[in-house]
Amino acid sequence: MRILFTGLGSIGRRHLRLLDERPEEFEVHAYRSGTAEGDGPAGIVEHDSLEAGLAVDPDVAFVTNPTALHVETATRCARSGCDLFLEKPLSDSLAGVEELQQVVDERDLITYVGCQLRFSPVLAAVRDALGADRIGDVLSFRATAGSHLPEWRPGQDYRNSYSASSELGGGVVLDLVHELDYIYWLLGDVATVDGHIGHLSSLEIETEDVAEIVLRTRSGALGSVHLDYFRRVPKRTLVVIGEAGVVRADLNEQTVTIETPAETDHREFDYTRDDVFRDQLGYFLEHVRTREPCHNDVPEAKRVLEIALEAKENQV
């Protein structure tokens, strides 16, 4: 299989490293703009333009450049017949998404947008508990994700990252779209969205560093999502309240607790960040092989993007 990467920042390099672990043989190419020659990983063929990368006729494109460039890049790759793995989020706007989907449909391509928390054993346990009706009908929920942006990417000045740039699609709402994605995945589509979004900290960025997003699902549950770039002690948790009990999940501590009047069921997990990305990669490659559609393909990721953009637009 011939694979083209459209960027080799930290996330692109992670995918590349995990590809290298797999038993299949891959011929890997990369288009890298603005990167010093010779500092790339060994064993890949580098190109100085996307056209040159596409000229080798890749089977799959990993779209791992900044968010604002995803759709344009993915569309060009799709026109060349590439199945697509896009890093999250799908984009920073809806511009061009319909055209991308049209090309994907015409070429019968496999697409997947990388929200790896769907492969977290913790969230899988939450999904199983909800599916087994262990807490009854869901009434409310609270998702929280916060950490300190300057510590995200060791060796890179956070002020120069895409997270800090409005033009490149940064800001907590899109950068931490995982929470909106897994709420959609666990609890279904959203009926209404309201957001309180701002820049409150001393971080030297031009994007929002905090968001409080209130959601009502189509099933009637009311809940909220908190996102921030400034929490010095990282936190990533989910609480789901049902008619019959509560599920508490801590993605950093890797625990799930199900509480009902009759019992408390506490589970602990042990996995690495790479394990989650590894399972995600295997899932995508298997669907490339079988030609069965992925979950979180372009249409599904578009809906999550719409929810995120509504949160930014419907500030109250």
Image (spheres, rainbow, N blue to C red):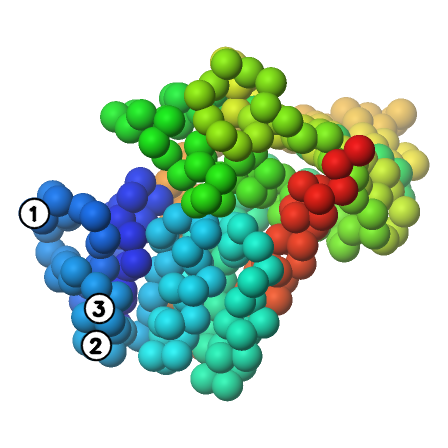
Q: Residue at x 22, y 54 (%)?
A: 32
Where is residue 131 shown, x and y percent of the image?
76, 50
Residue marked by disc 2: 55
Q: Which residue is mark 1?
A: 38
Q: Nearer the viewer, residue 38 or 109?
A: 38
- In contact (CB < 8 Å): disc 2 and disc 1: no
Q: Position of residue 308 (x, y in %)?
A: 65, 46
Determine whether the residue tagged by mark 1 lies in a helix, strand or loop: loop
| Label 2 or label 1, whichever comes before in sequence order | 1
> Relative to residue 189, is residue 114 drawn left or right?
left
Residue 238 is left or right of residue 152, and the answer is right
As shown in the figure, which amino acid type bears the numbered disc 1?
Gly
Mark 2 to mark 1 CA distance (whole Å): 21 Å
Q: Amino acid at mark 3?
A: Gly
Q: Is residue 308 above or below residue 234?
A: below
SS at mark 2 in the image: loop
Alpha carbons under labels 3 and 2: distance apart: 5 Å
- Between 189 and 138, which is closer to the camera in this rendering? 189
Query: Quick check: 105 left or right of 66?
Result: right
Q: Is residue 166 above or below residue 304?
A: above
Q: Earlier in the sequence, mark 3 or mark 1?
A: 1
* Residue found 52% across the figure and 54% down from its top: 91
Q: Is residue 47 visible?
A: yes
Q: Position of residue 128 (x, y in %)?
A: 69, 47
Please state the horizontal and vertical placement of residue 220, each as a whole percent of the image.
90, 47
Q: Which residue is mark 3?
A: 53
Check contact, mark 3 vs mark 1: CB within 8 A: no
* Residue 138 shows up from this direction: no
Residue drawn at point x = 47 percent, y = 19 percent: 203
Q: Residues within 10 Å of mark 3 (few under 14, many from 20)?
A: many
Q: Residues within 10 Å of mark 1 (few under 14, many from 20)?
A: few
